[in-house]
Amino acid sequence: MIRLIRYSLFFVLLGLSACNEVLEPKPVDLLVDELVLNEPNDVQPVRLGMYSSLRGAAAPIIIAGDFTADYIQFNGTFNDYRELGTKQITAANGAVEALWSNLYRTVYVANFMLETLPKVAGVPEATRKQVLAEARFLRGFANFIGTYTYGDIPQVTSTEQAANRVIGRTPRATILASVLADYEAALTDLPAIAAGSTNITTNATYLNKTTCRAAMARFYLYQKNWAKAEEMASAVINSGVYTLEPNYIDLVTRDFTGEAILEVGYNLSDDPGTDQNAFGLNNILAGRREVIPSNQLVLSLVSTEAGLRQSTIDFDTQDLGGSDNGWTVAKYGTASEDNNNIVLIRLAEMYLIRAEARAQLGRQTGATGAVADLNILRNRAKAPAITTTVQADVLLAVERERVYELAFEGHRWYDLVRTGRAQAVMSSFSPNWNSRYELWPIPQREVQQNPTLRAQQNPGY
C-alpha cells in the first residue's frame, strides 16, 4: 500500500532561527480532511508541510546514493547498515522503507495542495500561482528520485485513499514524462531571484526559477539529453544567484553557503543528527560509526587529485583499530555545529553536469569545453589542472571529479547506474554485488499491503 502520512500542521520554516519543533510521527493512514486548507490563513502551514515532507526524504536520499555504492564499509551493529555495507540489501531494509514513505509523503501533500488550493477563495493570485508551482516541483522531484531508486513506481496523482491503495507500478518513461511536465509548469510560476541576492538562506530553502532549472539540468543529464543539460546548467551558472564558495572547507563546515541551491535545514530543537529513527546522518556516520568511509574512497580523497576536498573526511587515531580505518565523514555535524543541514543541489554540480554534457557532445577543450569546467572546481580545490583532451578520458575525469567534489551528497550510486558503470565498479568493490542492486526493492510493507504490488517486486528480491 502507498501509505499516507498523518501530519501535524504545526510545520516550521526550515532552517531559520525562529523554528519551532517539527512533529514527525510514525507513518499511518491519513484522512484527507486532517489536512486543513479552507481559508487563506491555512495556506502557509500546508505549504511548509510540503517542504517538511521533502526534508524527511533528505537523509534517505544520501543513504541511497552513497551507502548503496562503494563509499562505505560496515562498522557497526545495525542490520540496515550491514545490508548496505555488505551489498546484501533486502526489501525489509529500514532505509529502503524510509525513502519510499517520505517520497510519497511529499507527493501526497503536494497533491492535496494542487487539489485544494484552487478552490480556496481570497488567496492572492500571485500567492496561489507560486504555491501551486512549488507543489508541482516537489511532486516532480519526489517522483524523479523515486523512479531512479526503485524503477517503475506507482504514479499517485490524487489524495483518493481507496484508489491509491491498489495502484500498481507505472513505467519509468511515464513517470519521467510527468516529472518534466511538473518541472515545466513549476518553472512558469516560481519566483525569479535577482542576480546578487544576498538572502542565501531563503535562496536555498524556498524554490525559485533557478532551483527548478538546476533540477531540470540533472533531469536532462540522466536522460542523456546533453544539449538541454548544458543549456539548463549554464542558465543556473550564469544567473548569478548562486556563487562558488572560494574555500571548499566551508562546504563541509557551514550551512547555507552561497553555493547551496536546495538545502533542507534543522535547528537545535529538531536536529535529527542523533535520532536513529530519523536516519540522522551524524549519528550514523560519526556518533555510532555504523558505516565508515571505504578504504577505496579514502585513498581517492587523500590523493593529490582531490586537493582540499579531502576535508570531506577526517581521521582520528582513537577510532583506529581492527577493521576500523579511523576515518569519519565530516560533512554532517550535530545540532550545536554549523553543518547539520543536508544540501540536495548545489552550484558545483551544475559545473559537473555541464562538463559531462559538453564532453558527451565532443567539446572537450576551449573556453566552453568540458575541461574548463572541471578545472574551475579543481582550481578552487588547489588540485592539479586536467590536461587530457581525449573524450573517453575526459568522461572518466568527470566521474572522478564527481567523487572528489560530491562525496556523501547522495550521487554516487545514481551516477554509476545511469552511466552503465555500476557492474564494473561495484563487482570489483564487493564480492556480494549483484546487478539487481542497480535498483532498490519495493519496501516489503508496501508489497504486503498493496495487492497490486505483490507480483511486481523488482527482480531478485
Image (spheres, grey):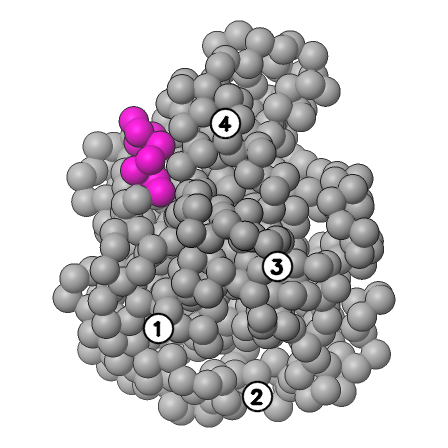
Type of amino acid under label 4:
Ala
Type of amino acid under label 1: Gly
Residue 123: mark in rendering: none
The reply to whether callout 1 and callout 3 are in contact (CB within 8 Å) is no
Give the residue type at disc 2.
Gln
Instruction: Residue 161: give its label.
Output: 2
Looking at the picture, how far across and down is residue 176, in whole percent?
Answer: 64, 54
Q: Which mark is residue 49?
A: 1
Few, some or many residues within 10 Å of mark 3 (<14, 14–19, 20+): many
Q: Element at badge 2?
A: helix
Q: Is residue 295 left or right of residue 199?
A: right
Segment tinted magenta in the rendering: 243-252
SS label for mark 1 = helix
Q: Residue at x 40, y 37 (%)?
A: 311
Q: Say what secondary structure mark 4 lies in.
A: loop
Sequence-earlier tag: 4 or 2:
2
Residue 245 magenta = yes
Q: Position of residue 139 (x, y in %)?
A: 50, 63
Q: Quadrant of residue 75?
A: bottom right
* Magenta stretch prevailing secondary structure: loop
Question: Mark 2 or mark 1, which has the lower sequence index?
Answer: 1
Which residue is labeled 3 in the image?
A: 74
Tell me the kind of residue under disc 3.
Phe
Q: Residues within 10 Å of mark 2 (few under 14, many from 20)?
A: some
Nearer the observer: mark 1 or 3; the answer is 3
Q: CA distance from mark 2 to mark 1?
A: 19 Å
Q: Residue at x 25, y 52 (%)?
A: 338
* Image quarter in which the N terminus is found: bottom right
Q: Earlier in the sequence, mark 1 or mark 3?
A: 1
